[in-house]
Amino acid sequence: MALFGITLVLAAILPPIPQPHAYHQFVDQRAFWSIPNFFNVISNLIFLWVGIVGLVFLKRLRMNTVQKTFAVIEERRPYLIVFMSVLMVSMGSAYYHWMPENSTLFWDRLPIAIGMMALLAATIVERIGIKQGLRALPLLIMIGIASVIHWYWSERQGEGNLNFYIVVQFSSIVLIVLLAALFPSRYSRGADICGVIALYGLAKFAEVLDEPIYQLGQIISGHTLKHLLAGLAVYGLLRMLRKRVLLEKVEDPIDHAGVNTSQSK
């Protein structure tokens, strides 16, 4: 977490990184059935689907007294926020691509920042400690929210600054990878998080290649492909949760964190 703090300090002192003027000009602007930017809008259905499926899965775990996904059921909290954020991304991103501008982009970026921070907290829970991860969760979420608000405020002032939003998105990914490399998970399928991050990395790469990918045959744009790959990454996260089991018992009761350990396996 010290590394995360250092990157936040750097974001504050380094020259601001502005948003490119052509950011909202996506290559695939085809409209169908009165829906502008049809494929960039409709591809958000994958987030709607995986968000709902993830939330239903977590709800069923709450009622399952023999579930093996979490040592204590309160470990669901970060993942509840992750899948709720994915559900909100489906709506925020569709809204943005229907009418691309900064005011709608705010509702796309906000749940993304929250979801990334929640996933970082979940990784801390599983590799450092339940108490530490759950205590970090609200602080990380507030940092994520603040980064998007700061970006939007700076745009309204005429001096766009993406520094904090970039830190939140990319530093969280780096920290998740580092935690996965340095600390073993208490659960099986721990390496699956690397596949999730790799898919998300491919999604960001496709986003950068929006036009070149579209020009391969004018079938799908890089940005639409980004949505599909990012949705698959979240599905990979859900698949990890479905298949994993606890490898070791919780040794340190966490009652002081307000967590009930009666469901420890």
Image (cartoon, rainbow, N blue to C red):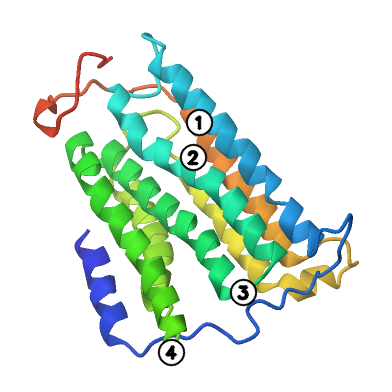
Alpha-carbon distance for marks 1 and 4? Answer: 38 Å
The amino acid type found where label 2 is placed reads: Phe
The amino acid type found where label 4 is placed reads: Glu
Alpha-carbon distance for marks 2 and 3? Answer: 25 Å
Of tags 3 and 1, the one toward the viewer is 3
Q: Earlier in the sequence, mark 1 or mark 4?
A: 1
- The N terminus: image quadrant: bottom left
- Mark 4: secondary structure: loop
The amino acid type found where label 1 is placed reads: Leu
Q: Which residue is mark 4?
A: 159
The amino acid type found where label 3 is placed reads: Glu
Q: Which residue is mark 1?
A: 55
Residue 185: assigned label: none
Q: Is residue 79 above or below residue 42?
A: above
Q: State the residue at coordinates (46%, 90%).
A: 158
Q: CB under 8 Å between callouts 1 and 4?
A: no
Q: State the residue at coordinates (56%, 51%).
A: 89
Q: Which residue is mark 3?
A: 101
- The C terminus: image quadrant: top left
Task: For label 2, count other residues whose C-alpha is less than 10 Å away and answer few (under 14), some (14-19) or many (20+).
Answer: many
Observer-nearest residue: 206 or 168?
168
**Outermost top residue:** 65
Alpha-carbon distance for marks 2 and 4? Answer: 33 Å
